[in-house]
Image: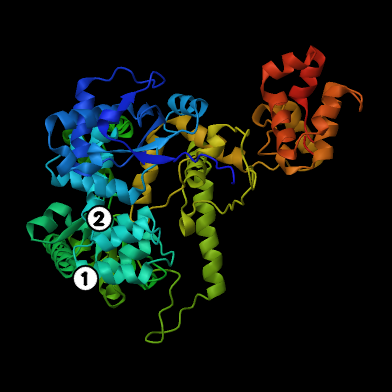
Amino acid sequence: MTKQTKIIATEARFPLEKLSLSPMNPRQDVPETDVIELAESIWAAGLIQSIAGLAGKKDTAQIVAGGRRLRALQYLAGQHPDMAKTRPELANPMVMLAPDADTAEAWANMENVARRDLHPAEEIRAYGKMEAKGGTVGAIARAFAVNEKHVYRRLALAHLPDAVLDALHANEISLSNAAAFTVSNDEKMTLEVLETVRGEGYSDHQIKQMIKPDSVRGSDRRVIYVTEAGYDEAGGRKTADLFKEQTFFDDVALLDELFDAKLSEAVETLRAEGWKWVEVHHESYLSPYTHGLEKFGSVYAEGGDLSEEEGERYDALAELAEAEVLDEKGEAELAALQAILDGTYSDGQRAHAGLYVYVDGQGNQCVSGALVKPEDKKAAIEAGVLRKSMHSSSGSDGPKSPISQKLRDDLGRVSRGARQHAALRDPDLIIDLLAYQLSHNLFWNDVFGITTTEVPNWPSTEAEGYVLDARLTENPPRNMMDAKDLAASFRAFRKKGAEHVRGELVRFLAAQFKGGDETLDALVSKITKPDTREVWTPTAANFFGRVGGPYMVAVWRDLLELAEDHPTVTTFAKLKKVEKAAKLEALFTQSDLRSALGVTEAQAARIDAWLPEGME
């Protein structure tokens, strides 16, 4: 007869009266409120996570992991005397059995080792069941030891069609894919899209586009301009995307209608000011070169002057605005003073010129400068509103100009020379303008004929261990907002003071520094005393992990001044490449390792100054 080996089941069901808390269980004392909250969760959603224990005599088991769940089940048994009939799965819970006492003790001492992690689909359904039984978000959060935001998001998923959660449980879609379906309010559309994307690796964005092909997000310029409140007041439909904390605006036709109506109101308001024409420009930007405006004439407002008292008040308000502490009343006062500086258009100018009104990409209403249409130029010139350009020919309708194109170019150069000559009288203005140009992306509106090229100062791969001055790495974006008045922008820039202007100039010029020839570069280095190790420390990620093992052994031996057969070297040489890299990084960054290796002051100095060949 063959010798039989006793097989111990890894899982088995036990009546509650056969289960007891093991002395190994670290949770010997649990607040009664925690037990009751968990009991409510288990009664609503079931015992999703099994408990673990060690089998004892007479078909008993001592629970080593899951003591709180055991107490909750025992509490339910007291509350529901007929639980063996109504909820037999709770009256006879499944217990994961340890094969021996050592394993049981390990389970007891290792948090969550004996627990089976819930699949997201199971967790979602468990929350949904508890909610259906009347559980509040707070109660669910306490029962599952999660925050309420997590519960809200899981409950949003719990309301999805079963087919979506089935696909999630089968790993045919990801959790974020499932979240994308929550923006749908059409179950038929949801199921059609699900069949398309199931197992195909579609992105969340693609799924939302399929579900909401005609909707727009809250970041759309039309939404920002109309405002969400205006859209709501008109009865527009919306869908919230809880997971991305954004909203879909579903009635696009209504949104367009509201957008056009608001722009039309702006046009009528401006026409009432006496402009010859005011028209809507439907695109989000207005460019002279792409929209034919180079053929128009430009009319400029006459800037006003502030009194000494008004100037001081303007400076004070501008400082508060820069610090973002200016209240609504102050903003209105600053705008009024700025309007004086910007100047106004005369009735005569308005009678011959007009404006384009448009909404930029950020939803701001913008107005072009005063423009004279090509067909209105002659009348505007005769009225003294527009000066005849010396660069334009009279065309085929009139006599040929006696001034040749070459002569026009020369005259233009003379005019520019006169402006440069005058600019020399104000060196501070020139420096301010240079700093302004460098710190703003002005495109074709550059003040100076100076171009800049990128001078790379950042590694192409890992930058760990590399810390440059923040002025070289965290500069604010060099933005050019073509809808803004550059003159007003420059005035605001100068108002920040000479220290700010100089700081902008210094950091942008420093970022352009290349060195020049050897003699000039050497002179600058002598003055500035650059130290590569001041900003860069070799680490496993940025250097050692990118070189070979023999090279690392040579560096280790050289820095510690050891012979090739020294035990410290031979032990290091046997390490895996990743271990060598980590060890060398520790040598450069951890004083404890240096102490353990007996690194001398001289060796420490060499390590702190060491650079790979080719670096300076």
Task: Tell me: 286 left or right of 586.
Answer: left
Give left or right: position of 449 versus 534.
left
Q: For the residue carrying disc 2, how many other residues have a C-alpha within 10 Å: few (<14), some (14-19), or many (20+)?
A: some
Between marks 2 and 1 in the image, the one whose residue lies nearer the viewer: 1
Residue 486 locus on image (x, y percent):
38, 50
The x, y position of residue 385, in whole percent, is: 27, 64
**Is the residue 479 above or below the residue 555 in the image?**
below
| In the image, residue 162 above or below residue 140 | below
> Which of the 4 image quarters holds residue 210?
bottom left
Label 1, residues with CA under 10 Å away: few <14, some 14-19, many ≥20: few
Name the N-terminal-most of marks 2 and 1: 1
Q: Is residue 504 visible?
A: yes
Between 180 and 358, the residue placed more toward the observer is 180
Q: Is residue 518 above or below residue 56?
A: below
Asked if marks 2 and 1 touch (Cβ < 8 Å), the reply is no
Amino acid type of the residue tagged 1 in the rendering: Lys
Percent x, y of residue 309: 24, 28
Residue 476 versus residue 397 in the image, above or below: above
Question: Label 2, on which residue?
Answer: 218
Residue occupying the point 51% across, 52% down: 418
- Residue lying at the far front in this picture: please name it: 1
The amino acid sitting under disc 2 is Gly
Colour pattern of the rendering? rainbow
What secondary structure is marked by label 2? loop
What residue is drawn where x is 75% and y is 39%?
577
Q: Which residue position is annotated with label 1?
A: 188
Q: Relative to the observer, which residue lies in front, 319 or 4?
A: 4
At 76% from the left and 37% from the top, the residue drawn is: 521
Q: Position of residue 442 (x, y in %)?
A: 46, 53
In the picture, measured across the screen, residue 119 lies left or right of residue 466, that is left
